[in-house]
């Protein structure tokens, strides 16, 4: 059974780059607009959203850097390559979302509760937030389109739980947090206008901060599993196992271990080979199986094969 994933692997990388680019362009434009509007209106919720957008721009830059670093070839110091670089930078992004986004927004809200003098030109804030929601929704839609290309027939939640594509998960989390944060800010500003009470604007900033902290913890927890060493997803492992079991050179597969290293995969196999062959032929058979694995799944870069006998 051969499963060719070459085109899927290319789509995997392209989807990540496109999603990050969509988010970067949207956040940069939104951040500048929010900053101007926050200065004009004196809105704490709007300023919190501006800081959040600038942090997201920096985050997308780090993800681009991580994707590039993960492509570096293995060397003597890193024999299994640099694939996990993308996990490291994804974890840093989660920390930035927590600190620069979440904690700053909470601080800004608490500070504004005692010192807020009311909004100036509040309709500017409403217009800016409304336009930002549209732009952020477009960015999220673009991310979801890219995810649809790689998640195959899985539901979105199942893909988030099982995917090893950390950079795409982070972009999805950022876009979702940004959209919900904008909605919080808009509600807070509107309530401040209706009631004349600026505390609602400060409360909106605190709400945005709490939202960002929750999402950053989720992203950090997800990426942690990949950082410490996680296997390939179940579908990939099943496909590898089926291919090995279909090979005439292998009588029985005793154990199969996979390790996801960014876009690359390491495979370790313990199997009972055809005992009727000579040692030289067994070595050739193992080499054939390794070549077939890499041919069927170009993401597999290392294969460690241990022949064993029945005990």
Image (cartoon, grey):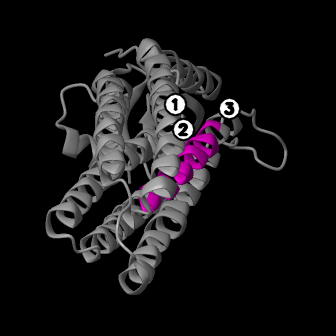
Could you tell me how far apart the alpha carbons at marks 1 and 2 are, in whole angstroms?
5 Å
Q: Quadrant of residue 158?
A: top left
Question: From which residue to which does the magenta span run?
Answer: 47-64
Residue 56 inside the magenta-drawn segment: yes
In the image, is residue 118 above or below residue 72?
below
Residue 147 inside the magenta-drawn segment: no
Closest to the observer, 211 or 172:
211
In the image, is residue 52 above or below residue 251?
below
Question: Contact (CB < 8 A) between labels 2 and 3?
Answer: no
Could you tell me how far apart the alpha carbons at marks 2 and 3 are, in whole angstroms?
26 Å
Q: Which of marks 3 and 2 precedes in the sequence?
A: 2
Q: Position of residue 176 (x, y in %)?
A: 31, 47
Residue 220: assigned label: none
Residue 25: assigned label: 1
Q: Residue at x 45, y 82 (%)?
A: 111
Magenta segment main secondary structure:
helix
Q: Which of marks 3 and 1 precedes in the sequence?
A: 1
Question: Contact (CB < 8 A) between labels 1 and 2?
Answer: yes
Residue 28: assigned label: 2
Q: Is residue 228 visible?
A: no
Q: Residues within 10 Å of mark 3 (few under 14, many from 20)?
A: some
Closest to the observer, 55 or 18:
55
Image quadrant where one finds the N terminus: top left
Q: Residue at x 30, y 68 (%)?
A: 201
Closest to the observer, 71 or 171:
171
In the image, is residue 234 above or below residue 55?
above
Q: Position of residue 89 (x, y in %)?
A: 60, 52
Q: Residues within 10 Å of mark 2 (few under 14, many from 20)?
A: some
Q: Secondary structure at mark 3?
A: loop
Residue behind mark 3: 71
Q: Secondary structure at mark 1?
A: helix
Q: Residue at x 48, y 41 (%)?
A: 33
């Amino acid at each position: 059974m051969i499963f060719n994933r070459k085109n899927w692997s290319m789509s995997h990388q392209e989807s990540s780059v496109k999603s990050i680019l969509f988010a970067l362009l949207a956040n940069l434009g939104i951040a500048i607009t929010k900053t101007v509007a926050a200065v004009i209106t004196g809105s704490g919720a709007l300023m919190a959203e501006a800081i959040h957008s600038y942090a997201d721009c920096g985050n997308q830059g780090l993800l681009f850097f991580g994707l590039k670093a993960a492509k570096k070839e293995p060397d003597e110091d890193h024999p299994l390559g640099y694939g996990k670089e993308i996990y490291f930078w994804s974890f840093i992004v989660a920390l930035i979302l927590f600190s620069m986004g979440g904690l700053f927004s909470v601080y800004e809200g608490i500070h504004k509760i005692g010192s807020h003098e009311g909004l100036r030109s509040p309709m500017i804030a409403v217009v800016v937030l409304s336009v930002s929601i549209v732009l952020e929704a477009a960015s999220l839609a673009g991310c979801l389109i890219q995810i649809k290309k790689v998640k195959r027939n899985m539901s979105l939640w199942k893909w988030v739980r099982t995917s090893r594509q950390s950079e795409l998960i982070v972009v999805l989390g950022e876009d979702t947090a940004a959209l919900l944060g904008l909605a919080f800010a808009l509600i807070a500003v509107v309530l401040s206008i209706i009631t004349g009470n600026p505390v609602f604007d400060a409360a909106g900033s605190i709400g945005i901060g709490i939202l960002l902290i929750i999402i950053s913890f989720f992203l950090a927890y997800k990426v942690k599993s990949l950082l410490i060493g996680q296997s390939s997803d179940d579908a990939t492992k099943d496909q590898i196992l089926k291919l090995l079991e279909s090979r005439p050179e292998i009588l029985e597969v005793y154990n199969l271990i996979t390790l996801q290293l960014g876009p690359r995969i390491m495979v370790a196999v313990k199997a009972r080979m055809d005992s009727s062959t000579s040692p030289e032929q067994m070595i050739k058979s193992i080499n054939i199986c390794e070549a077939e694995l890499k041919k069927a799944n170009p993401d597999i870069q290392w294969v460690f094969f241990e022949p064993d006998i029945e005990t």
